[in-house]
Amino acid sequence: MNRLSPRRAQWSGVWLCALHRPARSVYEGHPMTAYLAANIETKWQKAWDEAQVFLARRDESKPKYYVLEMFPYPSGRIHMGHVRNYTMGDVVARHKAATGFNVLHPMGWDAFGMPAENAAMASGGHPGEWTYANIATMRDQMKPLGLSIDWTREFATCDPEYYGQQQAMFIDMLSKGLVYRKNATVNWDPIDMTVLANEQVIDGCGWRSGAPVERRELTQWFFKISDYSDELLSALDSLDNWPDKVKTMQKNWIGKSHGLQFSFSLTDTNHGADRIEVYTTRPDTLMGASFVGISYDHPLAKKLAEDNADLAAFCEECRKGGTTEEELEKADKRGFDTGLTARHPFDTAWELPVYIANFILMDYGTGAVFGCPAHDARDHEFASKYDLAITPVFEAMAGDTTLPFTPLKSETVRYTRGFAGEDAQTGEQGVERAIDFCEANGVGQRVTKFRLRDWGLSRQRYWGCPIPVVHCQACGVVPEKKENLPVELPKDVSFDLPGNPLDRHPTWRNCACPACGADALRETDTMDTFVDSSWYYARFTSPRADTPTVAQDADYWMNVDQYIGGIEHAILHLLYSRFFARAMNMTGHLPDKAREPFNALFTQGMVTHEIYQTRGDNGRPVYHLPEEVAQGKVIATGEAVEIIPSAKMSKSKKNVVDPVSIISAFGADTARWFVLSDSPPERDVEWTAAGAEATSKHLARVWRLASDVADLPASGTGDEDLIRATHKAIVEVSQGFESFGFNASIAKLYGFTAVISKSKAGKEAKSFAVKTLAQLMSPLTPHLSEEIWALLGGTGLVTQAPWPVADPAMLVSDTVTMPIQINGKRRDELTIPKDMPKEALEKLVLANDAVIKALDGGQPKKLIVVPGRIINVVI
RNA sequence: GCCCGUGUGGCGGAAUGGUAGACGCAGGGGAUUCAAAAUCCCCCGCCGCGAGGCGUGCCGGUUCGAGUCCGGCCACGGGUACCA
């Protein structure tokens, strides 16, 4: 699930840095920390392992804290985005553990999905082998980072042990009516005879065959997420520690709307229908109706197509192209006049033409609308094209009559062809009055609808969790018996042909009907990989259980206290997980409190890097890895590179920095510190070699400081100042960790380190300061912190030491510095006792040179004093 | 198209409506050194000799005071239901 995405392009300092450096790889590293890291990092990782520091055990005597980062897709190698994501979670986990929580911090693999099948198609082999090999590589790459993960809980979603439990839940959900089958549209590649993912449709054509894709209907499995539309919407209000932007996106996605459902009667009833049912959120514009539009999949359209070849051809044309909302919305608005007319509900003599339109979807509402071109941009485009009436219903209060006029519903407008309510009212009022009026007059009824559609989980692919049902001639669709689970994927499959290998497997499909025992066929659809990732957080609470969850463990560990992942998952993954938790609750697999599984959510940005390019034969671009480039040249050939602004790190552009090379060059602590240092965690971060080197130098400086302090004589001056600074640092750094202000914590750590370096204090005070520094740094640089802690005689592991607490008495100061502004511009400042009365302060201000000069003998118009903050003299 | 974000020095970025540019990088100057590396110290938004002026994507507004709030734009990014 964890993938990077593109971002705003930017230049970085790598190029300049490389110019002024001797010709060596920019990743050669800083000798001091490279030496240090090599000597200490594995040592402390071993010490943590031996002490089983990160092993999570239920302990009712301690408050628990469950921190989870979105698990990675095993693509092959970890990238800096992973390092950043997991370091953030690690900082939270380590900080929480130090402040007294019993922490659960697990890791697993989102292991089903298309890339494994693509790899098998491209270079042979089996998707499972590819996936498990990738997992092994990535685990080996991740471990040197020193993450505080309980690796005993690790699993992959492609483990039969995991997906078998998923099948058990599917069966439970089926029995509770949460799963059903219906027809749905897919992208069909007519050459490869296979279903394509949206991503595999490029410019309307199949990515391999190049053939124009078609929409095709298949019977597919669905989760009834729509049963929970209202609850998923209203419960958003309870998610206090979720970003507002995510809640807004989900709210809009669910799309609750109120409107009127009514019907137009047809003048010609010889086509199996006497009326067209429509749904509208703007019934106040009924008097501006100029046409009725129906979907090309509407039953009436299908009926008419039977004896109208042109119309049938138009509908067929509409079914071409991809299925994405974006494509449908951006497509040219086209229609076909059916020749039928519909009577306006208010005036039976008023007849409206009925069009089939390519932009009306059967999936939403009733598959039919009325068009009001004066107040809808799309209808306006359509009406202009087909020369239909454009009748305004209301106008702007200011009198502007430009059409289409589409004000916000909250804006007050003047109704010129209204039929309910006041002349001047808001759109919202207009809609409400219109619905009331229509209901009172027998024209339709008030309806609430949701944009959210049921979750189609069927995939016509091999590498996914098999849907555990059987098709029996006699019994129909029958769930597999639980004792026969898992329904395992067969291993003997080939990917030399497109399509689903399960479909063409010679024996796998054959089975006995679980109900009657007769010969039957297995379902060959597998599940959407979003199903796998919709409950892994629950499975981590009892990863080896032979039921999906264990009540005791789920009760203790749920909910996830802090969930961390990419903003790209704001809607689908998070909404599906919220639904699935409810469905698991309904089927007895999660407690009530876990219906909202994620107490707090943090969405982090991506890691980017600039791209190095040269031109090969035919001017084709050739990309180079950052480690192959120095001084703006390819090291091996001396060829000059072109530098392209930063983009998401991607294998194809080779702008990837391998965390493994960073760790071997600088050590894990440097990598961990740097990925969190410069940018706020919710924003993207630009990886620069110069930045990593600066971090490395700083950590070396801290290490030298600690060594110096160990050798210090006992006497010194200014102990009190240093002790005060230490307490201040405790507060400031902790605050950053508690609020995802890692970059702010790091800035404070730089400052605190400088204060200690410059201090002339004695050994005791300095030793206290440096040990505190090591503790405050320990969530970020746990290895170096352990080493310093041990050097200065700290007790046990710093990882297990209680978090330092600041003494409030050491934080108060009795003076305050306030800026003086004149007309809002800063001119001077005053340092005064904190408790100085306002009158005395005002006198001081009026006696200030800058103020006297500005006043030039006159009196101020106003004197604003915000205690402890600012003084503004208005002249 | 629609929904959600983001935009501040040469660069990454800081700033409960209250001193714009903390901290770091790059750059400049100095110390140390036979010399270099490493290290340490100082300077560093733009214009101006200076007084001072101008500055947070653009245009407008609210306010004693706006990077921050409101309205309208522009650019870029994420999502758009089968990429994960």
Image (cartoon, rainbow, N blue to C red):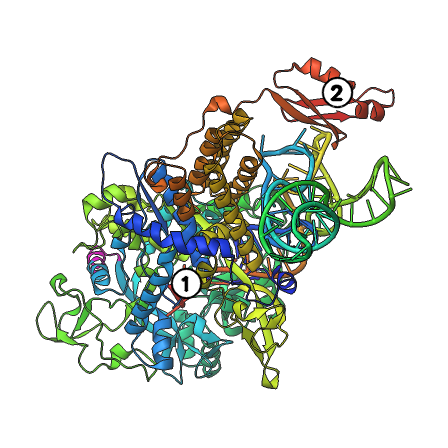
The span shown in magenta is A169-178
Q: Which residue is mark 1?
A: A78
Is residue A770 shown left or right of residue A144?
A: right
Is residue A163 shown left or right of residue A421?
A: left
Residue A683 in picture, x, y percent from top left: 53, 52
Judge whether residue A253 can be spotted in this image: no
Give the mark nearer the N terminus: 2 vs 1.
1
Name the residue: 50% across, 44% down.
A704
Q: CA distance from mark 2 to mark 1?
A: 60 Å
Magenta-span inclusion, residue A756: no
Name the residue: 32% across, 39% down.
A796
Query: Residue A141's quadrant in the figure?
Result: bottom left
Q: Can you say whether A238 is above or below A245 in the image? A: above
Magenta stretch, main secondary structure, is helix
Name the residue: 35% across, 35% down.
A802
Residue type marked 2: Val
Chain ID at mark 2: A
Chain ID at mark 1: A
Q: Which residue is mark 2?
A: A845
Q: Nearer the viewer, residue A592 or A409?
A: A592
* Label 1 Cα crowd, 10 Å radius (few <14 / some 14-19 / many 20+): many
Residue type marked 1: Ile
Residue A323 in picture, x, y percent from top left: 44, 70
Q: Nearer the viewer, residue A779 or A460?
A: A779
Q: Nearer the viewer, residue A296 or A6?
A: A6
Q: Secondary structure at mark 1?
A: loop
Residue positioned most to the left: A517
